[in-house]
Each structure stands twice: as structure tokens, then as C-alpha cells.
Amino acid sequence: MGRNPVPMNQHLGASTTALFVILLLSGNWRRAESARVFTMINDCKYTIWPAITPGENFGGGGFALDPGHSVVFTAPVGWSGRIWGRTGCNFDKAGKGNCETGSCGDSIKCGASGKPPATLAEFTLASPDFYDVSLVDGFNLPLVVTPVNGSGNCTAAGCDGDLRKNCPSELAVKAGKGGETVACRSACDVFDKDEYCCRGVYGNPVTCQPTYYSKKFKEACPTAYSYAYDDPTSIFTCSSTDYILTFCSNRKRPVCTYHDKKLVCSGSVASKSVLLGWIVSMVIVSIAAVLWGDI
């Protein structure tokens, strides 16, 4: 994965500042017409370890992302996979270790699916692309997938809040004995019953209906899969788009990326005055970084 993590100097427009510096320093302004640009932003107050499967062509499928940092990579049309965040990880210099949530083995580079519970972003890049955020395997981090500069049903998928704060006690994963809730398991994972797992006589969208637990998940993440057949409000299509994945944010927060040398933003923030202010601030930050390096 061609990634360039950069610290953000201001919370307002944080993703834009980081991405601008990345592109300015790398000179990576062009992308293949068929590729999709993915930007991952860590808005959490702690380090996370994003994971990608399959990730053979994307930096091995895993890396650390500090608070206030972002990373950019491209994926070709035809790629289909999952992206999620791991928390509470401890890796040695050889990249060996484990994570409190979202673990995919004993390596920082994921070669397998993550261990539930984990909030998943799922993509199939085609014409059009299909994407969603899924809580079918549980929840460990708020995650939003925002398509930018595309056409179609390009809706921001994911969360408005942090489910860990309101996770039913019977689903909660605690940090140590009596610690804080670090993740929320799915009812299927905890109870292993057909009505929660949408299997057996419940293995179709008619008989498998929302439960008390899936409704709790849906409250936190209105445009995410809360159970297996939650398709109508959870899977989206978009053509010729870039994607911004933001951890520990919400769907209403505007985000920006660069597309064909132009700053492109979601929502209503793409007004001239706001964009001008962001561009000026980014230029100042970039010049300061260069001057600081010359001192």
C-alpha cells in the first residue's frame, strides 16, 4: 500500500490538511482512471491498527495509524474486500503481537479475516461499486464510509454514535475484569440461536426480522447492516467515486479529498469561502513544514 501518514495540526478540516500535505510532498496527483482512491482518517483519541483483506497489494494488509493521522491508497476496479480497525494492539519490532479487538492473527499485517466483534467496511469495486458498513460481526469502533465525487446512490454509510457506550451488558466485551466496554458482540455470536443468526427457518428476509439487539445496533449506526438481511438501508452503490473512511467520527461530519487535482468535499462545506479558508490554512501548514525542515 502506498501510504503516507501525516499529523493533523488542526481539528477543523483535519482530514483535508493531512491529505493536502500528503499529496504536496509526494507529488502523487494523478491516479489511473480505473482506480479508486481510499483515504483513511483516525479521528480517535488513540492509535488504531487498520486492517485490509485481501491486502497483499496494500502494504501487507495492516499498519498503525496514530490519532490525527491519515493514509491514502488506491485500489483497482475488481478489488473486493474488507477494511476494519483494530484496537489495543501490542506488536514487537518484527510486527508480531496481538490486539484487544479486531485481531486477525499474531501479525500486524493481516492475512485473514478479523476476529469478531469488529465494525467492517465492505467493498466490491465494479461498475457501479457496492459498499456497506456491517455490524453483523459486532462493533468495536465507530466507522463512516463517505463516497466523494461519484454518481448514484452515494450515501455515507456507517455510524452516528459509539455503540460501546450503550451496549447491552450481555453483549459487552470488557477491558480486563470490570474494565470499560471495548466492543459489543453480536447477538448471534453470544446466543448462537437461529433467530439471531438468520439461519434454519430464519434463513430468509421474510422470517429473519430485526430483534431487540439489532435495533440497538441500528440506533447507533442507521446506515449500517445491523443483521444479515438489513439490505434496504445498508448497502449502497456509487460510480466513479473516491472513498473516505473515518474512524471515531459520524456521518454528518464533512470530509474532503483530492480528485483530479481538485479539492472535493462531502455535504454543504464545499462553499467557496470555506474551501478558500481551508486551502489557505493548508498552504500555511505546508510552507511551515518545509521551513521547519530547513532550520
Image (spheres, grey):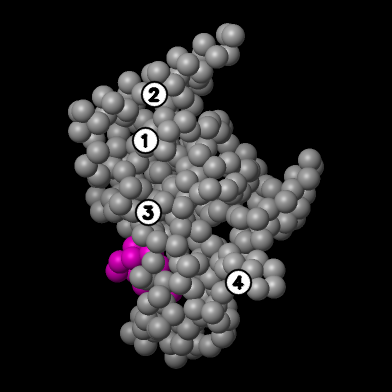
Give the numbered dot on residue 282: 2
* Residue 135: x %, y % from top left: 47, 67
| Kind of element beneath mark 3 | loop
Q: Mark 3 or mark 4, which has the lower sequence index?
A: 4
Give the numbered dot on residue 173: 4
Amino acid at the residue labelled 4: Val
Residues drawn in magenta: 221-234
What residue sits 65% from the left and 73% below the top?
178
Give the numbered dot on residue 250: 3
Q: Mark 2 or mark 3, which has the lower sequence index?
A: 3
Residue behind mark 1:
13
- Give the spatial CA distance, label 1 vs label 3: 14 Å
Amino acid at the residue labelled 3: Asn
Classify 10 Å Cα crowding around label 3: few (below 14), some (14-19), many (20 and above): many
Q: Mark 4 or mark 2, which has the lower sequence index?
A: 4
* Residue 280: x %, y % from top left: 33, 21
Q: Mark 4 or mark 1, which has the lower sequence index?
A: 1
What type of secondary structure mainly makes up the magenta span? loop
Amino acid at the residue labelled 1: Gly
What residue sits 24% from the left and 50% below the top?
152
Q: Mark 1 or mark 3, which has the lower sequence index?
A: 1
Classify 10 Å Cα crowding around label 1: few (below 14), some (14-19), many (20 and above): many
Q: Confirm whether the magenta stretch covers residue 227.
A: yes
